[in-house]
Amino acid sequence: MVGLLSLVGLVECRDRNVNSVKKSVKEALELINYSFPRAKKIVIKPNMCYYWDYSTGQTTDPNFVAALIEMFREEISPDVEISIVESDASAMKCKYAFKYLGYEKLAKKYRVNLVNLSEAESETAKVKVKDEIFEFLIPKIIKNADLRVNVPKMKYMTFTKISCALKNIFGCNPYPKKFKYHPKLNEVIVALNKVMPFDLHFLDGLIVRGSKTLKLGLIMASQDPVAMDAAAATIMSINPKSVDHVMLAEKEGLGKSSFAIKGVDLEYFRKRFPKRGFSEKAVVLGYRLVCALGLDKRLV
């Protein structure tokens, strides 16, 4: 922290090989003055939203996760137990995603666990956001981890404007039919982050998807998911104050939207990020209006 500002480290990494990513990740951690904790169990949550592989910019690159595994074993312990976690969703099943996205191969090579949270042992927990109580199943593997590591992507989203650190934890909810939460998506995202707080956040911006797919070469690190999302929104040319779940997360004490950049100037990445044009924004606004009027149900 710098006063009331949360530290966000930005590093440029031009190559996706494991050694290059590991070097850049370590540099990003040094920028935010991070000290490795003692840990016996580590959970890593990448973004596996669908069956698109890393080259689309939609899902976390398995090489990025491999770099983290090597780093943790070097810096914490070669015997640390590491689990990569994801849950089933309405249109994505882990048993296929793990294979198609390269995580089965990674798990075998690095001797780490692949865990489908929808099949893992869980316990019930309640959490309050604004004036409402939410109840979720919380996977014990996340609750009992000594270090929880979040590895999101940065993307435009129809209902939440952006998807980054906070939104990626939505995938830790083991309930597979996640569309049931869409009417209160902002509140649910914040509730899940409150009941399952992650300790460290790395943005895989090696390849990004905006108006097109682009090799951006960005690695971002922060201990504050709100600050990371605010920085990511700024790079995407979206005012963080207009992103409801980010502002709600700040109000609920999950972090600060005011951030201090360390490392590469944020403007360098903002100028290069493939921003949406007017026509794409109009389509999104039109769809939101259709949903607000309840007309989307007639389209199903």
Image (cartoon, grey):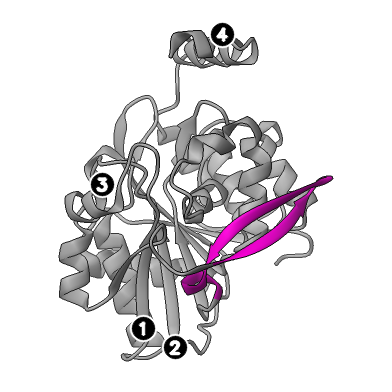
The residue type indicated by label 3 comes to: Tyr
Q: Give the alpha-carbon distance from disc 1 to disc 3, as whole Å.
A: 25 Å
Name the mark on residue 295.
Answer: 4
Magenta range: 123-143
Label 1, on which residue? 81
Quarter residue 41 falls in:
bottom left
**How many neighbours does mark 2 have within 10 angstroms: few (below 14), some (14-19), or many (20 or more)?**
some
The residue type indicated by label 1 comes to: Glu
Left of 175 or right of it: where is 185? right
Say which label, 4 or 1, has the lower sequence index.
1
Q: Give the alpha-carbon distance from disc 4 to disc 1, as whole Å.
A: 48 Å
Closer to the eye: label 3 or 4: 4
Label 3, on which residue? 54
The residue type indicated by label 4 comes to: Leu
Left of 216 or right of it: where is 9? right
Name the mark on residue 40.
Answer: 2
Say which label, 2 or 3, has the lower sequence index.
2
Residue 289 shows in this picture: yes
**How many neighbours does mark 3 have within 10 angstroms: few (below 14), some (14-19), or many (20 or more)?**
many
Q: Give the alpha-carbon distance from disc 1 to disc 2, as whole Å.
A: 6 Å
- Asked if the residue at tag 2 contacts the one at tag 1, i.e. Cβ–Cβ closer than 8 Å, the answer is yes
Residue at x 66% of width, y 63% of height:
125
**How many neighbours does mark 1 have within 10 angstroms: few (below 14), some (14-19), or many (20 or more)?**
some
Q: Give the alpha-carbon distance from disc 2 to disc 4, as whole Å.
A: 51 Å
Residue at x 52% of width, y 41% of height:
267
Quarter residue 11 falls in:
bottom left
Closer to the eye: label 4 or 1: 4
Q: Main secondary structure of the magenta part?
A: strand
The residue type indicated by label 2 comes to: Lys
